Image (cartoon, rainbow, N blue to C red):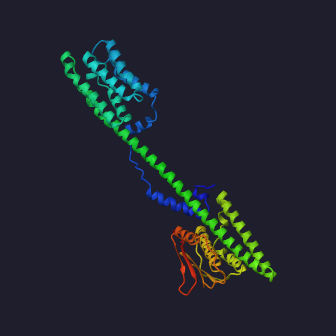
């Protein structure tokens, strides 16, 4: 199981996770936190609600009760018979119940009601031209729910119809006041609806981009974890199997003439096998229980045990340390150990019988691991996988360090890795 929580990962996975997260945070689309207008916030709250519900009924009822009941009950003046006032007011409010499901038909229906009221000389509100919120609410809904082309066409059609009928209404009923207040009210209503729609779509695009980047971060983190595990398995298995191959070959050669040396070689094979099994179990434990196994990873202090095991296999190895250790963190210490382990494994594989030296320089700011050999091999070299140096270089680069590997001027081969300590731990 690969956990994504940084606190539940072992040291190297935690560092890899942090580096990947840093890269992706730098590339993220910045969140825009501007204050939304009240109508945009309200439209966003209503965006997921398409079917008519109680709120739509309340809006339609408020338009009728707040602007028509005063006319019917007598306190406010209107125009026309009461039955015509009630009928046209009801027809102007009823489409608002279905405005979110059918925004364009609702807006056109309200427009037709206002055109009929103008031609019939009926004012179902106390204001000139039956001024009220009905048509403005309908146009706002069209601009909020429909694409800009449809909403502009609907708003223009509503404006043209209400304005075009004014001269005819004034001609037919010169005693009744008429004006273009309905058309004027549609303009800010459309602008408010369009702003709400545009802002909501922008927020939706940000959410989609955030989900895409989160999926990409997840993919990168998983890839980093797979790469880390492949490096660990390669280092453990190649080192142990190389030791087993060397010792089994030596045991085969001396089994008949020098049984004591064969016995020692078989003992070394047993030790290498057990060590490999222990490290594989540790690696699997880190995968299953990252928090519990984080303290069991090899560190720089374990290089002495690695040197002793290699010497027991017959490798002529010199080990030196210098400087004062600092707080390097488990990830850096594990990488230093694995680089030294892989470089020494390469000596036994590619230059068997050569004399090798392991030098570790410790400062408060970095760890330098140097592995050299004199190239004086006493047996043919065995081909490798080609992944050893690449894996060591990946470990060094992961911590912002560097690795140099190549032939020495005086013969032999050298590997030098410089691993800087994390800035927070210096």
Residue at (66% x, 63% y) in the render = 283
- Evaluate whether residue 37 shows in this view: no
Residue at (42% x, 44% y) in the render = 203
From the top left corner, tell me how far across and down residue 336 is, in percent.
Answer: 59, 73
Q: Is residue 254 left or right of residue 98?
A: right
- Evaluate whether residue 227 shows in this view: yes
From the top left corner, tell me how far across and down residue 188 is, in percent.
Answer: 30, 35
From the top left corner, tell me how far across and down residue 243 is, in percent.
Answer: 69, 74
Q: Nearer the viewer, residue 242 or 163?
A: 242
Residue furthest out toward the bottom: 410
Number of residue marks: 0
Q: Is residue 120 left or right of residue 145?
A: left
Residue 104: quadrant of the picture:
top left
Residue 277: quadrant of the picture:
bottom right
From the top left corner, tell me how far across and down residue 41 is, in percent.
Answer: 41, 39
Residue at (76% x, 72% y) in the render = 270
Tell me the quadrant of the picture where the N terminus can be found.
bottom right
Residue at (59% x, 58% y) in the render = 7
Residue 308: quadrant of the picture:
bottom right
Above or below residue 27? Residue 269 is: below
């Amino acid at each position: 199981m690969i956990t994504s929580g940084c606190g539940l990962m072992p040291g190297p996975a935690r560092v890899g996770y942090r580096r990947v997260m840093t890269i992706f945070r730098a590339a993220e689309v910045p969140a825009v936190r501007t204050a939304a207008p009240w109508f945009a916030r309200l439209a966003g709250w209503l965006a997921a609600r398409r079917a008519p519900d109680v709120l739509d009924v309340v809006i339609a009822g408020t338009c009728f009760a707040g602007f028509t009941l005063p006319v019917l009950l007598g306190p406010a003046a209107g125009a026309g018979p009461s039955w015509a006032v009630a009928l046209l007011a009801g027809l102007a409010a009823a489409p608002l119940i279905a405005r979110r499901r059918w925004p364009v038909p609702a807006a056109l229906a309200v427009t037709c009601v206002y055109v009929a009221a103008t031609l019939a000389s009926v004012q179902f509100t106390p204001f000139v031209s039956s001024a009220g919120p009905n048509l403005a609410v309908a146009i706002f809904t069209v601009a909020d729910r429909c694409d800009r082309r449809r909403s502009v066409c609907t708003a223009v059609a509503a404006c043209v119809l209400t304005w075009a009928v004014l001269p005819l209404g004034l001609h037919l009923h010169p005693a009744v006041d008429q004006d273009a207040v309905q058309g004027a009210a549609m303009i800010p209503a459309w602008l408010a609806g369009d702003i709400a729609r545009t802002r909501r779509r922008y927020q939706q695009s940000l959410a989609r981009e955030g989900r895409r980047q989160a999926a990409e971060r997840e993919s990168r983190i998983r890839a980093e974890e797979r790469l880390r595990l492949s490096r660990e398995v390669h280092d453990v298995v190649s080192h142990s199997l190389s030791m087993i191959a060397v010792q089994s070959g030596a045991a085969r050669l001396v089994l008949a003439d020098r049984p004591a040396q064969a016995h020692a070689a078989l003992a070394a094979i047993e030790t290498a096998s057990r060590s490999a099994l222990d490290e594989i179990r540790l690696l699997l434990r880190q995968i299953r229980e990252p928090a519990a196994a984080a303290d069991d990873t090899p560190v720089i202090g374990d290089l002495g045990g690695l040197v002793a095991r290699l010497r027991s296999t017959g490798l002529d190895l010199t080990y030196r340390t210098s400087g004062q250790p600092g707080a390097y963190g488990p990830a850096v210490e594990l990488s230093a150990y694995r680089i030294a382990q892989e470089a020494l494994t390469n000596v036994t594989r590619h230059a068997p019988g050569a004399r090798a030296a392991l030098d570790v320089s410790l400062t408060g700011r970095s760890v330098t691991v140097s592995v050299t050999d004199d190239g004086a091999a006493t047996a043919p070299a065995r081909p490798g996988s080609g992944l050893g140096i690449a894996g060591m270089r990946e470990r060094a680069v992961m911590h912002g360090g560097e690795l140099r590997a190549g032939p020495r001027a005086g013969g032999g081969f050298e590997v030098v890795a410089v691993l800087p300590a994390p800035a927070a731990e210096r």
